[in-house]
Image (cartoon, rainbow, N blue to C red):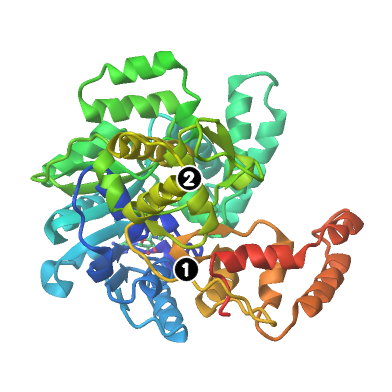
Amino acid sequence: MEQNNAYDKLPYSNNILPQTHPDVLSSFASLQGLTPPDIQKSRILELGCGNGLNLICHAADLPESEFIGIDLAENHIEKAKATAKRFAVGNVNFHQKDLMKLSESDFGKFDYIIAHGLISWVPQAVRDKTFSIFSKLLSENGIGYLSYNTYPVWHYVQMLRNIGRLHARDITDSTEAAESAMTFLDLLTECVPPDTIYKSILKQETDFMKQLPKTSAVHDMFGEINEAFYFVDFVSELKKNGLKFAAEVENLSTRFNSLPPRAFEFIDAIDDVIWREQYLDFFVGRAFRQTLVCHEEIETGYLVEPSAFENFFLASSLRPVSKEPELQTQKPEKFLGAQGRVIESAHPLTKTALYELGNRWGNTVHYSKLLNDSREALTKFGFPAEDWTKEFEAARSLLLTVHMQTDLLEVHTYQKEVDTSVGKKPAVKKLARMAVEEADFVLLEYNRGMRIEDPLLRKLLELADGSRTMDEIESELVSFVKSSDEIEDKERVIGNLSIKAEIDRFAYLGLFSG
Ligand SMILES: C[S@@+](CC[C@H](N)C(=O)[O-])C[C@H]1O[C@@H](n2cnc3c(N)ncnc32)[C@H](O)[C@@H]1O
């Protein structure tokens, strides 16, 4: 029997998911020493692709690769086809199809398969079939991406979900039911006894649910199916299908860094990588995973491979704090990155490489070119290196640490020319305009992007459509602030408007079409 699809009634939210871009998948796999297929000549499949926005953005970025998206919901696929046509993205095709009926004879094999937000929200049979598709349709060195909810922390979410569903038991319309559930959960959070664990869980999880797009709350939180897995159980499913864990799409971010040394001592003492990952979930309280998988036969060392770093194109916005940094000496220099984060290095070749990267921010530079250019610059400054091999090794290890632990140094597996110019009448590129309109998302070159939280930024991007000069944009923005109900403290906001700086910031990252 065909699965009854709630998404036909209420389409899912418009998502752009940079973490599913083949560049990201191949970078994480490469760092673990795997040799994933060349993303610029690949075949990529997305299962449960929703309304296709995500795949359209990836396809537009990699015009030589072929993308196919399938989804059960007819309205999702109609929308996906219309959007791809509207933005003339020709290397992506969408098919309304139940994945239960998908086989190799339909579209062949794929180098990358993406299933975001699927396996936790479908019946067991569809979940089983998804694993089998990954097994049968992934090419030899192919990389699969699966995201899913994880225990133990998902138990908290399920507690609220169960309360909400019981409360809304008699409401048949899913949107109304979710609204009623949320209203009740709010009331409950306020009323339960203070200073209890119960109250703090309710508060934390209702806050989390409130920031979700409305349709995600309806489907993801209060829909029929909402499963979570312990990582070890997820891996057992992989094994049954001749697959295995390859890597997790997550850097050693601040939440790992905040663990005390005792936690790392405990985790490091575990030999089995799968159990090590499981214990990491226990320690950091991870509720969601984005896991890369590959065929069982592929060798995986589960150790970051420093030499793999040498194949990447690098980019960084880090800038020296000092106006005249001393690069050629061992003097520690601070470098400032996004959100005011600072790193420090005393190593001359590393400092010079970071300095060079900062100068080229927006674009990427190949690792070996960067290091060779940096060596040349240091030699000119009179740096007395005795052993360049040692200096190169030290720089590689330090740069890798910056990448792994701070997110301030990007790695990419492809290179493209980023046009950083901006005309007299700034015009946001066509595809980026779609992202603003459809997904409240700023989509920049190299798959950089962010959700738009600020109404002022959204308005600025809307106004930058090629028909207005900067002055005209500024005066319309001032009128917008004055008439907006969303913006408080209007005088301060108007006083702080810096249109040129904001446009320059995004121009640097290739948002405008010159
Ligand atoms: C939670 S949504 C996720 C959409 C998108 N991947 C995202 O993360 O934004 C799940 C999607 O899977 C699709 N889906 C569910 N069961 C399916 C099936 N049997 N075959 C194909 N697609 C299915 C739904 O129609 C829906 O678009």
Residue 454 versus residue 306: which sits nearer the camera?
306
Three-letter amino acid code at disc 1? Lys
- Marker disc for residue 9: 1
**Residue at position x 30%, y 69% from top?**
70
Residue 378 in view: yes
Q: Secondary structure at mark 1?
A: loop
Residue 327 versus residue 35: which sits nearer the camera?
327
First in sequence, mark 2 or 1: give its number: 1
Residue 51 versus residue 317: which sits nearer the camera?
317
Q: Is residue 460 left or right of residue 360?
A: right
Q: Position of residue 148 (x, y in %)?
A: 36, 45
Residue lying farthest right?
A: 491
**Residue at position x 57%, y 51% from top?**
212
Q: Position of residue 439 (x, y in %)?
A: 55, 66
Q: Position of residue 326 (x, y in %)?
A: 57, 39
User: What's the distance in space between the residues labelled 2 and 1, CA to CA?
Assistant: 56 Å
Q: Quadrant of ligand 1?
A: bottom left
Q: Is residue 8 left or right of residue 469?
A: left
- Marker disc for residue 409: none
Q: Secondary structure at mark 2?
A: helix
Please report contact status of discs 2 and 1: CB closer than 8 Å, yes or no.
no
Occupied quadrant, residue 234 = top left
Three-letter amino acid code at disc 2? Thr
Label 2: how many residues lie within 10 Å, few (<14), some (14-19) or many (20+)?
A: many
Residue 316 in view: no
- According to the picture, the residue beneath numbered tag 2 turns out to be 352
Q: Position of residue 87 (x, y in %)?
A: 46, 83
Residue 206 versus residue 180: which sits nearer the camera?
206
